[in-house]
Image (cartoon, helix red, strand yellow):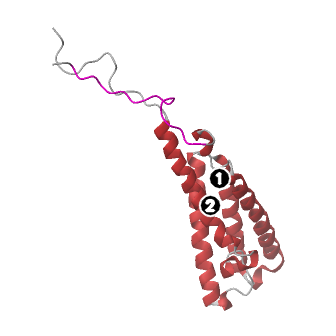
Amino acid sequence: MADPQPTERPGPAERPQPAGRPPADRTRTNSGPGRLLIAVYLLFAIAATSRAGLQIATRFEAAPMAYLLSALAAAVYIVAAVGLGRAGRTGRLIALACCTVELVGVVGVGAVSRARPELFPDETVWSGFGSGYGYIPLVLPVLGLLWLWRTRHDLDLAAASRSRPSRVAPDQSFGPPAT
């Protein structure tokens, strides 16, 4: 009876590769559409920081909660842009946390601001579900989470396409030595 030979996995050149860019480029959050997403986050970071800074400096006593929420939104936008720009595992986790906080914030603040408008005498970035900013604050975290999912999916494909060393060295045999 012949010794069974270990099956080796095909090398990277033998595996089918996804069309388009190489997998390493497609898994980066700061490439392709991710660049536009980062630019929008930076634009909103500047807008929210400017608005919150002016409101806090000039009329904080009028609506402190609303202005502090705008400052929080600005901080979330800044950190999300940095996370998306880093393109590594840590950046991905930072961006995931920020997009999640942002989505919960815009939905929560939006719902409260519609149900109890007296709590928000002045608008925030997230009040009215971001209506003061064309509802982009509501759409942006969804796009961010979709992009993170998309690049994570590609990351799994890239990991699957990398060659892995065989668990058994080619010169090892299974079973008793041949006589």
**Residues at circles 1 and 2 in contact by the CB criterion of under 8 Å:** yes
Residue receiving disc 2: 144
Residue at 71% in and 66% down: 74
In the image, is residue 14 above or below residue 51? above
Q: Quadrant of the C terminus?
A: top left
| Side (left or right) of 54 relative to 16 | right
Q: Check disc 2 and give the amino acid type.
A: Gly
Q: Please tell me whether residue 162 is drawn above or below residue 64 in the rendered image.
A: above
* Residue carrying label 1: 84
Secondary structure mostly seen in the magenta stretch: loop
Q: Residue at x 81, y 68 (%)?
A: 50
Q: At 72% from the left edge and 56% from the top edge, which residue is drawn?
A: 36
- Residue 63 percent location from the top left of the image: 73, 83
- Numbered badge on residue 103: none
- CA–CA distance in space, label 1 to label 2: 9 Å
Which sits in the foreground, 142 or 126? 142
Quarter residue 46 falls in: bottom right
Magenta-tinted stretch: 3-19
For the point 58% across and 78% down, the residue is: 108
Name the kind of residue labelled 1 in the image: Leu
Nearest the viewer among 59 and 175 is: 175
